[in-house]
Image (tube, rainbow, N blue to C red):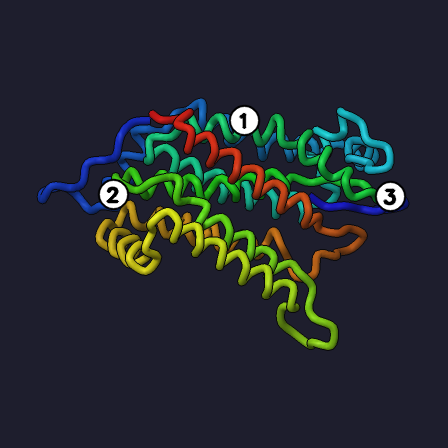
Amino acid sequence: MRASSNARSDGTAAERDAGGGGPSDARVRRELLARLRLVDLLALAAVPGILGAVFALPESTRRSLAFAYADPTVLTAFTAHYVHLDAGHLAGNVAGYVLLAGVGYALAVLAGHRRFFVAALATFLGAFPFVLSALNLAVPRNAIGFGFSGINMALAGLLPVLIGVYARERFFPTASIRALPAVFFPLVGWMAFLALPVSPGALDGPGLAGVATAAAGLLLGLLYASSTGIRIRAALREAARAAVSNAGDGDLFAVGVALTVGYPVVGFPGDPTGEGSVVNLYVHLLGFCLAFIGSFALLAAGVFEE
């Protein structure tokens, strides 16, 4: 989401190939195609269509649908997250959505957690706009908020959880979902490292606050892993070995990990200012954290065991 001045601005783990089957990547593609549901694809495709339809409205109408922090309404708390004022902002958010929702859906389907993904996506699209807009009021300012990036960051927060259930179903049947916070803390530290301003007098590089927060996130992740009995080096070696030895499953796993680590570079730019607008890093962090914590809590409680 951006802020602008008011003045202007289902199933079980897949069987492994048993000698005479085709290549692993072809097997995974066939399995994914067999599990896809047309209604899911239509629902996923509807989101860019809605964003494009809203962008086709006159600019004055779109501005009236943005969330004015000084004069908030329930309607604009929702509509603002589907409003974009320039084509570049819209294109970036649509591209991010396609990547995050597409990879997330594939992971969920192959992990047998389609219902979980659908419920999470519906929550992000229907409830998160109100929640994120309401929490934005904690930072008073005379500006308007708009854009889909807060929901994209919620999808980014869901992605590590989906990677966890995918790895458990495809590689490590005895792994526990309760270990996922060991990944959450370093990811939040990574976002702080990217977003916090440079030190006074430094020509380039992260400031002390960003480095300290990143280090704290890494330390918390290690402490959590230690408290749950996870051996970090062994776990990383096993994950890498499993991904390499299972080409089809491993490719999707690698794409998910790369997207999890790489997307925050887009969501938390070092310089959030642009022409007449500012990237709302606060709502991005809220979207990520709320999505991860909520989805992890539901899975840990066994609500979506399939």
Residue 91 visible in the snapshot: no
If you read the primary sequence from the N terminus, does the residue marked by circle 1 or circle 3 appear first? 1
Q: Which residue occupies 27% across, 47% down?
A: 248
Residue farthest along the left direction in this orientation: 19
Mark 1: amino acid? Ala
Quarter of the image where one finds residue 180: top left
Give how far across and how far down residue 144 sits, in percent: 80, 40
Q: Is residue 282 left or right of residue 299?
A: right
Mark 2 vs mark 1, CA separation in Å:
31 Å
Q: Which residue occupies 65% across, 74% down?
A: 204
How many callouts does the rendering have? 3
Residue position for label 1? 122
Quarter of the image where one finds residue 123: top right
If you read the primary sequence from the N terminus, does the residue marked by circle 2 or circle 3 appear first? 2
Q: Are marks 1 and 3 in contact (CB under 8 Å)?
A: no
Which quarter of the rendering shows the C terminus?
top left
Give how far across and how far down residue 16 sits, in percent: 18, 40
10 Å crowding of disc 3: few (<14), some (14-19), many (20+): few
10 Å crowding of disc 2: few (<14), some (14-19), many (20+): few
Residue 26 is tagged as 2
Mark 1 vs mark 3, CA separation in Å:
31 Å
- Local secondary structure at mark 3: loop
Residue position for label 3? 142
In the rendered view, would you say 189 is above or below 90?
A: below
Q: Is residue 186 left or right of residue 246?
A: right
